Image (spheres, rainbow, N blue to C red):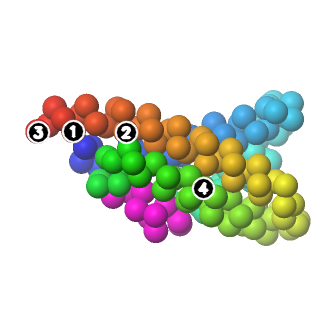
């Protein structure tokens, strides 16, 4: 396993950024004028993710190295989505739209489990070589 979780944390951030971009792209909102709105979604969701992920053990080696634990990022994303949406609403001085929370949770869960599965595939051979 990697000695530090820097790669895992950067991957989480990249996955959240990619998910945010894809979300805006589905609405045809990808030019630079939408960057502030993307940031207003990305940062609150990232804060929510990194507040909750440790509670689900998502930075513990025994969890990240075990593919049977891939349910954990799904559950963490499903809990982080409402928190992120509330933080976003607070930041933008607006309301939380329930369908947004559902879609944010579902896409975040899918994206994070794909990223964490890829991480496991990359990290596992590195761990095997170090033994």
Q: Which residue is mark 2?
A: 120
Q: Residues under labels 1 and 3: Cα distance?
A: 7 Å
Q: Assess whether mark 1 and mark 4 are in contact (beta carbons under 8 angstroms).
A: no
Q: Residues under labels 3 and 2: Cα distance?
A: 16 Å
Return the x and y of residue 119 as percentages of the image width and height: 40, 38
Query: Which residues fall within the magenta stretch?
Result: 51-60
Is residue 10 visible in the rendered image? The answer is: no
- Say the numbered circle drawn on residue 131: 3
Q: Residues under labels 1 and 2: Cα distance?
A: 10 Å
Q: Which residue is painted at 34% across and 32% down in the image?
A: 122
Q: Which residue is mark 4?
A: 77
Q: Assess whether mark 3 and mark 1 are in contact (beta carbons under 8 angstroms).
A: yes
Q: Which residue is mark 1?
A: 127
Residue nearest the viewer, comparing 105 with 25: 105
Return the x and y of residue 63 as percentages of the image width and height: 35, 54
Q: Residue furthest front?
A: 68
Disc 2, SS: helix
Instruction: Tell me if 120 is positioned left or right of 106 in this view.
Output: left
């Amino acid at each position: 396993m990697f000695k530090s979780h820097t790669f895992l944390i950067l991957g989480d951030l990249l996955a959240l950024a990619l998910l945010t971009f894809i979300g805006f792209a589905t609405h045809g909102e990808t030019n630079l004028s939408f960057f502030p709105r993307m940031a207003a979604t990305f940062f609150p969701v990232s804060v929510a993710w990194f507040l909750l992920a440790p509670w689900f053990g998502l930075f513990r080696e025994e969890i990240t190295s075990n593919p049977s634990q891939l349910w954990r990022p799904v559950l963490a994303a499903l809990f982080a989505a409402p928190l992120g949406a509330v933080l976003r609403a607070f930041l933008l001085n607006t309301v939380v739209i329930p369908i947004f929370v559902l879609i944010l949770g579902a896409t975040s869960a899918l994206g994070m489990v794909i990223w964490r599965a890829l991480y496991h595939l990359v990290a596992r051979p590195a761990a095997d070589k170090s033994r």
